[in-house]
Image: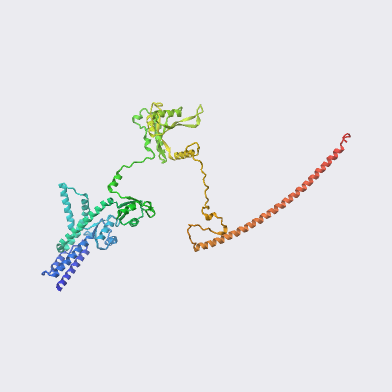
Amino acid sequence: QNSQDSCYREDSEKEDDVKDDFDNSEIKQEPASDQVEDYLGTSEIKQEPNDSDEEIETNKSQDERKNVNVKQARLIIRNLSFKATEAKLKAHFTPYGEITEVKLLRRPNGTLVGCGFVQFAKKQAAAKAIYHTSGKHFLERPVIVDWALPKDKFTKMQQDVLNKKIKKEDGEEISPSDISIVKEEDESDEESSEEEDESDEGSSEEKSENSDSEEEEEEEVTKNIKQELDVEKRERKQDVEEGKTVFVKNLPFSATDEEFRECMEQFGPVFYALVCKDKFTEHSKGSGFVKFKKKDDAEKCLSSGTELTLKGTILDPHPALKRSEVQKLNDKPKEKKDNRNLYLTKEGMIIAGTPAARGVSVSDMERRLQLEQWKTTKLRNLNMFVSRNRLVIHNLPATFTDKQLHKLFQSHAGSSAIIKEARIMRDLKHLDSKGQSVSKGFGFVSFEKHEDALKALRSINNNPSIFTPNTRPIVAFSIENRSVLNSKTNRMIKSRQKNPLCKDYKAKEEVPAKKSKYESNSKHEEQNEPEFAGVTAKPGSTVKMRQKYKLTNQAQQHLQDVKKQKKEMKMNRKLRRVEHIKKKQVEKKMTKKNKKAVDNDSAFTKLVDKYKSKLLSQTNEKKKWYDS
């Protein structure tokens, strides 16, 4: 038995070496099938079955099952760039798990086909790689990653499609998902079958021995996959009905799935938390979905309100809806809001060639076209809008008055219509023979209700029986400036509030004097502390100890302040001296002037006395005899 075991070990080692040589060889080389068959023929040992042979068979079956499980972790990559190499492809897929083999398909001349295979050590790693890499770019080219299927499975899939087509002829329906899956896997299976065919030629005898076990394993795997898919579909259907899923709006665009999950786990355990991303740009849409394990946790999240924040932004949670409900909401016709009432510009428009244009004079038509151009230029300003209750009328006679205008519109709008204002615009600079301002030929009429204004417009506009057939009235809804109207209404409100006779009158309330920046309500500041007391402590203020460099700055600043004070003191002393000197000089000048004035006064009195004495002496000499 020991000799038999050693022979078998040698044979198995040689078989493994042949397999490794075949796996490492390129597809363009022909497999050495004849050599393998010759070798296998020599390695067969015909003996009676013993216990050791049964153990060897069990070991073989275990190895075969391991090989089947390994093959399940094999991926096919399509639409590869011709710049791709095995090293680059391996580097691209290594982050998702351990890779045992990488192979690129080549033509007989050595050029790349654009397809390759990656063998992972574990099936979970392969599934992760499909999720993260399928449909994404590799070497500036979108890559399609899918499971690599053996040839037997591919033929079974083709037979299933044929059977479904036959059933369809009998009257049964086919789901479009089945056909799409087969179409997607068609190309990948053909390419994978080429590789499998070559490997099958190299190990034909092994396949014949192990085909039964492989088929059983594959059937078990397919059943498990189908069961998992059915469970996932049921879970997806029940997600919304269970009430555990929450749709979150206003997510920060920089938030990741992990950050979103951490934020949501404050309410309870979470199944998943995913940020919605754009298909093409892969940027966040600013929203996401969260599924909690408990319904109560989802309700907590929905009732969180403004407390729920992520990266400083307030999140907006909503209960998740079904796709059918979302489609219904999207399919509803959205009402277009026309805040400027632009549709009213077409009301009363006269188009050439229509019955309304018959009998209209050329001058009237030109006037209407000019007004249309004026409207289009005015409405380019977004502050301008079409009034619903105010009408403008053109082609008014020169002698038409405000009362006549009011009476005209009242008669055509009906007795129940309320006219707020009817005014003809006049040129105040030019006066007629009676001393009144000349009419500009147009006016405005404002109604309380839109229906009355519309009725008056339709009955007066282009009516040949009102003025004359050649000059018909041109009536339209007036164009207003929103900013001007707002300022006008504000002025009216203020004037009513100031008018004591108005209901909206508000007496002036004594407005408390505004506090200055340095005033405060604290009790500590109300006390008059002396200047030398220093800084007063305030309750509630943050305590921050001053740092060393700030203390040095304080010392330097104090030195500078002391120097400034000394300079100011010196300057003040100099100024005082100068002022004192100036005062003395002024006093000296005043004393000199006073002396001169006194001398002048004394000289003047002397002169007066001399003249008096002379006059008196003359009068005494000329006295008559009877005056004595």
Give the color scheme: rainbow, by chain, secondary structure or one colour. rainbow
Q: Position of residue 58 (x, y in %)?
A: 16, 66
Q: Quadrant of residue 202?
A: bottom left
**Which residue is at the front of the view, 192 or 120?**
120
**Residue at figure coordinates x 38%, y 40% from the top left:** 339
Position of 375 compared to 143: left or right?
Answer: right
Residue that appears at 21% across and 49% down: 176
Q: Is residue 4 among what the camera can see?
A: yes
Q: Which percent across, then down, holds residue 217?
A: 18, 60
Q: Quadrant of the C terminus?
A: top right
Please tell me how many numbered marks the rendered image carries: 0
Q: Is residue 447 left or right of residue 145?
A: right
- Which residue reaches farthest right? 625
Looking at the image, which residue is at 52% across and 61% down?
Answer: 553
Q: Is residue 304 above or below residue 456?
A: below
Nearer to the camera, 155 or 385: 385
User: What x and y, as percent, mark residue 52?
Assistant: 14, 70
Residue 377 image offset from top left, x and y in percent: 41, 38
Residue closest to the far left: 48
Q: Quadrant of the N terminus?
A: bottom left
Query: Would you identify the image quadrant in which residue 33 lies?
Result: bottom left
Q: Is residue 565 left or right of residue 596?
A: left
Q: Which is more toward the observer, 418 or 307? A: 307
